[in-house]
Amino acid sequence: MDLTLKVWRQDGPGEPGEFKEYEAKGISADSSFLEMLDFVNERLVEAGEEPIEFDHDCREGICGTCGVMINGHPHGDQKGTATCQLHMRKFNDGDRIVIEPWRATGMPVIRDLIVDRSPLDRIIEAGGYVSVNTGGTPDANLIPIPQMAAESSMDAASCIGCAACIAACPNSAGQLFTSAKLAHLNLLPQGQPERYERTVAMVDKMEEFFGSCTNHAECEEACPKSISIDNIAFMNRDYIAGKFKDRRKAGQS
Amino acid sequence: MTTLDAKVPEGPIQDKWTNHRFDIKLVNPANKRKYDVIIIGTGLAGASAAATMGELGYNVKVFTYHDSPRRAHSIAAQGGINAAKNYPNDGDSIYRLFYDTVKGGDYRSREANVYRLAEVSNEIIDQCTAQGVPFAREYSGLLDNRSFGGAQVSRTFYARGQTGQQLLLGAYQALARQVGLGNVTLFNRSEMLEVVLHEGRAVGVVVRDLVTGEITSHSAHAVVLATGGYSNVFFLSTNAMACNTTAIWRAYRKGALFSNPCFTQIHPTCIPVHDEFQSKLTLMSESLRNDGRIWVPVDPDETRAANDIPEEERDYYLERIYPSFGNLAPRDVASRAAMRMIDENKGVGPLKNGVYLDFADAIGRLGKDVIEARYGNLFEMYERITDEDPYEVPMRIYPAPHYTMGGLWVDYNLMTTVPGLYAIGEANFSDHGANRLGASALMQGLADGYFVLPYTIADYLADYLNVAPVPTDHEAFQATEEEVRSRIDKLLSINGSRTVDSFHRELGRIMIDECGLARTKSGLEKALRDIPALREEFWKDVKVTGTDDSYNSELAKAARVADFFELAELMCRDALEREESCGGHFRVEHQTEEGEAKRDDINQAHSSAWEWKGLSVPPEHHKEALDFEYVALAQRSYK
Ligand SMILES: Cc1cc2nc3c(=O)[nH]c(=O)nc-3n(C[C@H](O)[C@H](O)[C@H](O)COP(=O)(O)OP(=O)(O)OC[C@H]3O[C@@H](n4cnc5c(N)ncnc54)[C@H](O)[C@@H]3O)c2cc1C
Ligand code: FES
């Protein structure tokens, strides 16, 4: 198939950027979206031009490295699909595709389609863990966990940290990412001792970088792992509870 | 000349690790903060080591070329992690896990290391559970297990088809905690390009910032490489796009011996290649073989759709040839059997390059819901890629390069032959011999990082108490930085006519043809002529666009591919030298009448360890003899 790409090019952080057009001819419908970009890039290099820089690694939808806006949708408009898992058969011959980086003040562009997502690491560093050191832990089966709880926790833990949720949000809010990590840990017995401290610390850190949630739910729509916005409600409840100091001391809700 | 001393502790195998921990030197808690340790890589091995060393009080600097530690290739592991818990009460034990792993590795691993791995496997499950890793559970709330190839017990713990993701997130979170506490400093988007040696010891690294292109030196008392495997030498593999050999290859060029480079694993269940534009191959977890049945049509000229082929015209060849292990035969065995079917022209799919993996029976027996709960995300991934629904038609699968058992040679302490330089996880050669069993890499990465290295490294560090690290303005660092700069300048200045990928693709084709599933003397000799020629062409005609002071993925890729060329040559040399078939290394000249791998335990019961002598000089071949005191050497049989 033959396509026209309109791609955001930007040399570096803080530099002005612009859209440029490229022809992508003879693309196989079985190629993935990123293979299509590889193909265009290889032609650019052959012509002595600098290729379009984009982030990617596993190409299996699990590492969360990839992610671009495709025709205004984070990861394109196929539901529950990361950019690398999107295939060209979902497009039509002759299509014009607009490709942009994630846009959010908290995630500045590094180059072309690559953005700096390190604030997500800062949020995890603020409390997205269980404070156990290596060694001396009890036998794993000493803590039975109802299957339902383990499954719900796993649903939230499936987040790949790609930041599509933030890119999708009109306010560039980080609620879906943050609440997914909180739900993963706060739903499990292991997560209970630090539940409220964790919630307050992570939410406060999140607010240093990202906007506020006003319930647009665009994040859930954009999430390649279909993480539910119910997690946000759960997080908000724990945040309020965490703000009541006596409850936090008692370690219960 | 380097001599190989594996430093295996004395005593019965069950006591070696306990005795060793008592015998080696310790660093007392108050002194730990006087040591700087550099860890390269944040996969399961690197993240777990960095977190643990940080908790213990060492000053740790950790580097990754990814934008976040959580992106390491370990994230993609699907199927599970082994441990000898024996929760299902089906006869498992530490000894059985040890035995299966030595046997599965086709008797080319070091017994003492493997025993230790089996011994600490249970602690890993406890540790991960305590961190909140959401392993699959039964209705009782207790942990669930499944089976993997090469084992007749259920010992694999899993988190849906995302076990690597969940284990890595556990380790990443433990690491993030240490970063937050200030015990570990994290350098993301930073690629290590050289190890720095002074007076024969590893004293630091030279690193390039992938965003700014800045080249900096970092010094430490010890350097740990946790940089993963090198399957991407084949161009198409199941590894993530950026996986490469640079860290260990540079270490090899600085004197660390490289062991068994030709021991690579071709995984039987991957989605077949669809066309020439393909950039990578996708694994379908081995766990699928718990419920899927593998078959090909009996008739090579078969044209009907899979579902229209009647039962009696199907050949469930694994069940037929290996009745006791059936579809769960180990990977090397299953891959070669698939290759034979395809060679007999019984392949399926448009390119006749696959075999069927069929879930119809399992869906009939257990219901679609159960299958969906077990493998839902894999089925979805398969459908995305192939546009076929595996609930309705059988999957098509084909063997693909997946894992590398070879790596830097390490002793029992996980130290390479360069003092102060360690290698952990897939980057080292230990534990898996000539073939790795499923669900054992995650186990090894976490064993090394959480439970082995943090102890054994003290034995080395103890001697350097109050010795300051070599400063980065020292001549040793300056000279190494210069080497790195001139190599980068060289790559940018060639301005030839061919892209990096075109070279990489061509190298991959040579490697898969001559050093892939089946290897021959003449093929390897041919590869040893073709690879250096291609390498020379690369250095004359590669085209790398852009500059060295901004984000430049072509430049990073070019440097990695340059190292793949040299590694490829060593792999072929190793494969040529090893006159036997064992595990993933199948030399066509050495096979039984039934076409199974034929080992030569008299002449080849050793690990090869290669010493770099220069670019056009053959490397020196060292051998570590392997003694099997506990597991009797036997023809591996899965029949
Ligand atoms: C698709 C797939 C599925 C798998 N499934 C399973 C499974 O179910 N069970 C199992 O046991 N095993 C499985 N494996 C194997 C297993 O995932 C890997 O062997 C293991 O995760 C490797 O971990 P590691 O920590 O050694 O390396 P990696 O996870 O590869 O991490 C390497 C790290 O090193 C960094 N790095 C590398 N070089 C440099 C450098 N020069 N400078 C800076 N940083 C560098 C990278 O950024 C990364 O952080 C699977 C493998 C694949 C490919
Ligand atoms: S490249 Fe890993 S999720 Fe897309």
Image: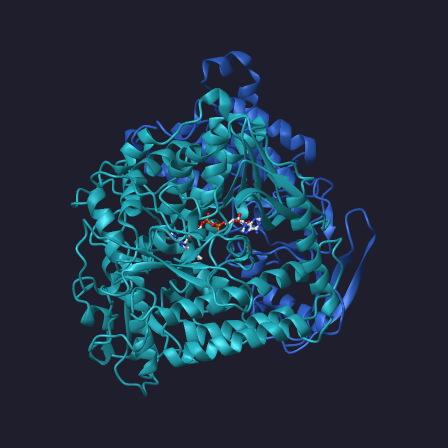
Chain colours: A blue, B cyan
As drawn, is A154 to the left or to the right of B188?
Answer: left
The residue furthest right is: A16
Q: Is residue B100 above or below residue B27?
A: below
| Residue in the image at 63% along x and 47% along y | B206
Residue B516 image position (x, y, % from top left): 41, 71
- A171 or B484, nearer to the observer: B484
B485 over B536 or under it: above or below: above
**Residue occupying the point 46% across, 60% down:** B381
Which residue is pictured at 34% across the width and 65% down the height?
Answer: B584
* Quadrant of the rendered image holding ligand 2: bottom right
**Residue B545 image position (x, y, % from top left):** 73, 65
Q: Is residue A51 visible?
A: no
Left or right of residue B194, residue A193 in this image:
left
Instruction: Estimate the x, y position of residue B8 in percent, counting from the top left.
Output: 30, 43
* Residue situated in front as seen by the camera: B168 or B98: B98
Inspect this view and state whether residue B386 appears: yes
Residue A27, image x, y percentages? 62, 75
**In what quadrant of the picture does the N terminus of chain B appear?**
bottom left
Say whether residue B500 is left or right of residue B70. Answer: right
